[in-house]
Amino acid sequence: MPLLHTRPPKFQEAALLRWSSNFCVAQVSKGPQRGCIIGNFRGRMERPGLNPFSRTLNERWPCSTSPKRGASISVRSLDTTMRSHYFMGVSSVALIALGGYIAVALSSLPRQIARNSPERASVFRPLFFNFAADYDDGSVLGLAIGSTRDELFGAFQSQYAATGVLQAACGREDGAPPLTVAQSDVTLGEAGARELLDREVACLWLPARSIMLVFRFAGDRLHVVELSYVRNELNL
């Protein structure tokens, strides 16, 4: 199906078969250029012999029907074919993207992303896009596992003094008297904040980011960090 880059020769006879605002199809029944021609002619051909494509690039296909009756290439069927190819292409891209998303979601990559940004990692946790993971090595949100209690509290003060609060109820012994609302959240600058890390379990809440960090100690060192991020509080 060659594309004619030059002006085609004069046609001895031509008849407009289909036309729209963007395309028209003409049939040439005589001469060396006999066949079906399609182009972007904007208008109606009034008389036989007029070449509607003299100012455009044209593509020519052999006619599938008798030259006497003329070829009938429907713009509607061409549009349908083009749309089918378009939707097939879009569907293929969507399936590839979905496959990539599932592959990432099932891999360890979201856990690695969550060490620095649980918000981004939660994108790979449908349906509610919350995230939770436990870590026993490396660092989580700038807090190194294996740190001593004093080192951990120093990291709290340097990184989360203005945004984090310790949960006083976290790690309390069974049967301890209940706390008031004012007593339950302890800012890192308050008196007694450091003592909360002397328990076997300590909790740091980052309200602006909806992140809870639960710290479990083995002896004097941080052993496990339990990270949870809540984007959506709906439950199944």
Image: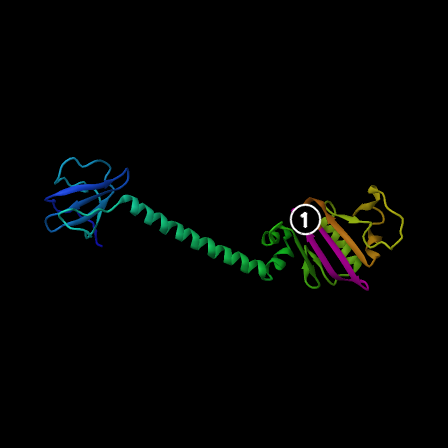
Residue 193 covered by magenta stretch: no
Q: Secondary structure at mark 1?
A: loop
For residue 101, above or below residue 7 = below
Q: Is residue 86 above or below residue 218?
A: above
- x and y percentages locating residue 106 in the rendered image: 58, 60
Magenta stretch, residue numbers: 212-232
Residue at the disc numbered 1:
235
Asked if residue 236 lies left or right of residue 83, the reply is right
Q: Is residue 228 magenta?
A: yes
Residue 44 lies, in percent from the top left, at 21, 36
Residue at 80% of width from left, 57% of height from top? Answer: 201
Tell me if 126 is positioned left or right of 144 in this view.
left
Left or right, 195 with reference to 223: right
Residue 7 visible, this angle: no
Colouring style? rainbow
Residue 54 placement (x, y as % from top left): 17, 42
Q: Give the amino acid type for the residue marked by disc 1 in the picture.
A: Asn
Predominant secondary structure, magenta span:
strand
